[in-house]
Image: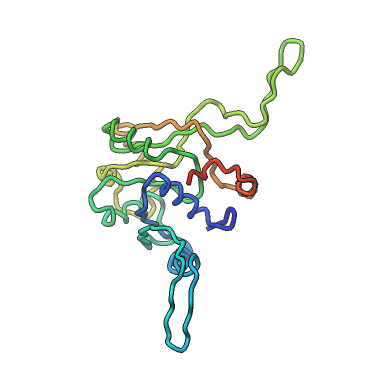
Amino acid sequence: MVEIGGKPMLWHIMKIYEAHGFNDFIILLGYKGYVIKEYFSNYYLHTSDVTIDLAENKTIIHNNRSEKWRITLIDTGELAMTGARIRKAKAYTEGQPFMLTYGDGVADVNVRNLVDAHQKSGKAITMTSVQPEGRFGALDINSSNEIVRFAEKPKGDGNWINGGFFVCEQSVFDYLPAGDDLVFEQEPLRQLAEDGRMNAFRHTGFWKPMDALRDKQQLESLWAKDQAPWKVW
């Protein structure tokens, strides 16, 4: 619920999906999940003009500007880890393939292309893979100690990492045994990879997790300058 440009990070992520035609969301709630419930419970009211008639005890909505989202909010427990939370959502996926992401990162991922790549792969799960920026600047120095190239934030060491935008088949639930201590990124994903059931969707565009105050400030700056690459809507 940390805000970028006056809107929670969660809202930005949902807008990315909406831009590609996906409007049905399941949000897995944990610590302070009631804050997210209250936000969406009042969202319609806060994004519309209203007349509140206290004498008649009624509210009239004018000029509704809210998104056409269907949102299911599930209490998965304050202490449940990522794998346990996903398993508890199975009943709400209606036996269909589903997408999955975290609540702390944005990207200009083409979600339609991601889904297409997953369907073509025939795998149980497709993970968006990204190459994060290096933390420090990089210098290219020749034999004469002359700096011939300076890159402020080059890509990291060339490795691909989990970018957090997944497409999953129902069979992924077979890799999620009972227990609130189940971490999705550990045994479940390792086993899926070892079984040859995981596909990679390489994303070379913008990707940014918000892990620290510095990240929030960078995202805020991009939004304020109207240069936010993830704003695809």
The residue at the point 30 percent across, 53 percent down is 178
The residue at the point 46 percent across, 61 percent down is 65
Residue 166, quarter of picture: top left
* 41 or 193: nearer the viewer: 41
The number of callouts visible is 0
Horizontal side, residue 109 vs residue 6: left or right: left
Residue 43 position, x and y percent, is 46, 65
Horizontal side, residue 141 vs residue 27: left or right: right
The residue at the point 42 percent across, 87 percent down is 56
Horizontal side, residue 159 vs residue 77: left or right: right
Residue 189, quarter of picture: top left
* 231 or 114: nearer the viewer: 231
Residue 78 position, x and y percent, is 43, 61
Residue sitting at the far front: 63
The residue at the point 49 percent across, 65 percent down is 47
Residue 180 position, x and y percent, is 37, 55
Above or below residue 118? Residue 40 is below
Residue sitting at the far bottom: 55
Residue 64, quarter of picture: bottom left
* 81 or 41: nearer the viewer: 41
Residue sitting at the far top: 143
